[in-house]
Image (cartoon, grey):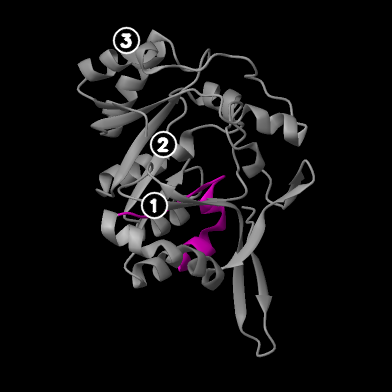
Amino acid sequence: MAQAFHATANDKGDIFVKALIFNIQRFSLHDGKGIRTTVFFKGCNLRCNWCANPESLSLEPELMQGKPVGKYYTVEELMAEILKDKPFYDKSNGGVTLSGGEPLLQADFVSALCDALHASGINVAIETAASVPKAIFAKILKKCDHAFIDLKHWDVNKHLEGTGTDNRQILANIRYALAHKLPVTLRIPIIPGYNDSRADALAFSELLKTLGASDVQLLPFHQLGESKYTRLGMPYEYSGIPQLGEESLEEYSRILSDAGIKIQIGG
């Protein structure tokens, strides 16, 4: 599996692993409790047609309208940025959320970063699509205080059609996490024409019960990333398609609720 981190050595022969990061977003109020810093890892092994962060896809640094996207950090360099906001984490019971892209593609770095964060008393959450080998998934999730896992489609072929990979490894990892009582939240991004029908809601409700999930977050489709495709010179399949409001998910939510699934709209 490709990884985006680099390793360098100093004149003493000490090895420093570096990860490719494309954004450090401070004062985030989502994707975990309290005030958080979200660290966005560059590189993803899915190709979701609706991706809001197309600049996250490549495993290499690139340019967006002449501006560099992606910078390599050691754990020490990244911790120096994160620790600037530690007083806010402490006051709000917040912490750091690892996002992307797919942070689990840079698992060795993420493992070391989790250790450093916990050594500094900082809560760690991770956002992942869970499309990685179970050994990597299990190792990292055991080091995180919470994980948000996307479940993009219930059907193996439709998942492949919309994301470029099927969902078999993802479902196996979700089953593992739930069976081992790991602190996870499942999320379904609701995408127009892809997984937003009544039939999809019914199928998801059956799948969630089979997985042993008791709650899920529904993430309405938005267009916050549309302009990035233009700036990167990339085609965007969902150009001009209206965003979904919470009211458009009422029936979807009701179907899942009727199946005994606790619903939260938005993250």
Q: Position of residue 7 (x, y in %)?
A: 65, 71
Q: Position of residue 117 (x, y in %)?
A: 39, 66
Residue at 31% from the left image edge and 30% from the top image edge = 216
User: CB atoms at circles 1 and 2 under 8 Å apart?
Assistant: no
Disc on res. 171: 2
Secondary structure of residue under mark 1:
strand
- Above or below, 4 against 206 in this view is below
Report the side of 80 relative to 235 (left or right). left
Q: Earlier in the sequence, mark 3 or mark 2?
A: 2
- Above or below, 144 against 79 in this view is above
Report the side of 4 relative to 247 (left or right). right
The one nearer the camera, 38 or 237, is 38
**Circle 1 sits on which residue?**
36
Give the label, 3 or 2, closer to the camera: 3
Report the side of 115 relative to 227 (left or right). left
> Residue 159: within the magenta?
no
The one nearer the camera, 217 or 175, is 217
Residue at 28% from the left image edge and 43% from the top image edge = 178
Disc 2 packing (10 Å; few <14; some 14–19; many ≥20): some
Q: Amino acid at mark 1?
A: Arg
From mark 1 to mark 2, how far is it between C-alphas? 28 Å
Q: Amino acid at mark 2?
A: Leu
User: CB atoms at circles 3 and 2 under 8 Å apart?
Assistant: no
Query: What span is colored magenta in the figure?
Result: 94-113
Disc on res. 251: 3
> Residue 110: within the magenta?
yes
Q: Amino acid at mark 3?
A: Glu
Q: Earlier in the sequence, mark 3 or mark 1?
A: 1
Q: Earlier in the sequence, mark 1 or mark 2?
A: 1
Report the side of 229 relative to 30 (left or right). right
User: CB atoms at circles 3 and 1 under 8 Å apart?
Assistant: no
